Structure formats: structure tokens, C-alpha cells
Image (cartoon, grey):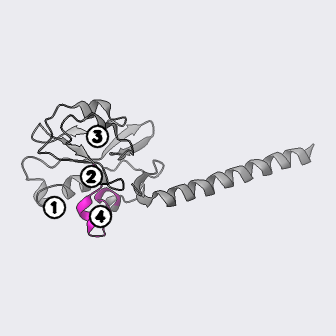
Amino acid sequence: MDKAIMINIEKCLACKSCEIACAVAHSKSGVLEEAVEELPRPQRMVTVEAAGEFGVPLQCRHCEAAPCIEICPTGAIQRFDEQAPVVVDADLCIGCKLCMLICPFGVLQIGPEGRAIIKCDMCLERMGKGQEPACVEACPTGALKLISLKEATKSKRREASKQLVKEVEQKKSKSEEK
């Protein structure tokens, strides 16, 4: 995929706005006031986990070599092309839970009917309309961002360069003191 939801845990307040927005976005009505009355209850596909002093929003990372796709015996978990997110066809899913066991992030879960797996689909419908995924849009601190991988790697290179310059300047400063 050329886009990913990046997480800055230092900005996460663990407010769970992303969880609520995700559940509402995947509800029948798409409206909070109505979604709370729906049966079965809408399920979130992002979960904020406590990790020390941080809240960590976790959702499917849409792995390039997705182990869930490889292990699925019915082909229910698939990617339409190499740039698309990993999605589940609920009609093909038999609920064997092999994908849940193999997921390195533990983010797949059983759907409300107790059979098919549900997982983050990066809000394909919303993105098709030019909108961000619901979790990203709802995050009040910007801890979740939808960015291109090109953007992400450029940012990492910039940070690595700054760190290297800082280290060289510190070494130079220390040698001048001697």
C-alpha cells in the first residue's frame, strides 16, 4: 500500500475517539445517536491499548506479505491489488480463527454475529470519497495520521540526518574541550 495510518503514541490521550468513530463509520446508520441503538452493536476495528504511560491505538497494519491472507483456507481475506488494503469477505469467512492466531498485532476479531472476522479496512468507502479514515479524522490530537509511505520515509530520513548531525556536533564539542 502507498498509504498507512501512522501512530504517534506521545500524542495519544487514550480518549478512544478513534474507537467510537470507527464503530460509527462501520455501523448501519453511520450516525452516533442511531448506532448506539443498533443490534448487533457496531464494533470498532481499532483498539486503544494501555502500554505503560501511553495509549496505543492498534489496527490492522495491512502487511505487504499479510500472514492472514496466506493462512485463510477459504480466501476470505484478500487484497484486490498490491496497493489496496487487506479486507475480509464475510460471506466466505468460516470463522476458523486461524488469522487471529497468526496476526502479529492481534488486531483481528470475531464479528458481532460470532462467525466472520472483522478488521480495519482503512474506511475504503470514506477514502473513495476523498475522506480520511474515521479514526484519523476523529483523533483530537493528531496522534493518528494517514500519510504516504514516501512521506513517512522522507520524514524518517530527515530525523536520522538531524540525529547524526547532533552526534557529530557533540563529539566535535567534546574534542574541542580537551
Please report the residue visible at 57 percent of the width from the left and 53 percent of the height from the top.
156
User: Element type at marker 3?
Assistant: helix
Labels 3, 2: front one: 3
Image coordinates of residue 105 in percent, x first then y, are 36, 37
Q: Which residue is mark 1?
A: 30
Mark 4 is surrounded, within 10 Å at the Cα level, by few (under 14), some (14 to 19) or many (20 or more) other residues, namely few
First in residue order: circle 1 vs circle 2: 1
Q: Residue at x 15, y 62 (%)?
A: 31
Magenta-colored span: 119-136
Q: Find disc 3 in the rendering and name its residue.
A: 69
The three-letter amino acid code for the residue at tag 4 is Met
* Mark whose residue sits in front, 4 or 1: 4
| Amino acid tagged 1 | Gly
Q: CA distance from mark 2 to mark 4?
A: 10 Å
Q: Which residue is mark 4?
A: 127
**Mark 1 vs mark 2, CA separation in Å:** 16 Å
Q: Mark 4 and mark 1: span between their CA atoms?
A: 15 Å
Of mark 4 and mark 1, the one earlier in the sequence is: 1
99 or 166, which lies in front?
A: 99
Query: Is residue 113 shown above or below 150?
Result: above
Q: CA distance from mark 1 to mark 3?
A: 28 Å
User: Considering only order in the chain, which callout, 2 or 3, is on the residue closer to the N terminus?
Assistant: 3
Was residue 37 drawn as part of the magenta stretch in this picture? no
Who comes first in sequence, dot 3 or dot 4? 3
**Secondary element at image label 1:** loop
Q: Quadrant of the N terminus?
A: bottom left
60 displayed left or right of 110: right
Q: Which mark is residue 9?
A: none
Disc 2 element: loop
**Residue 4 image offset from top left, x and y in percent:** 40, 54
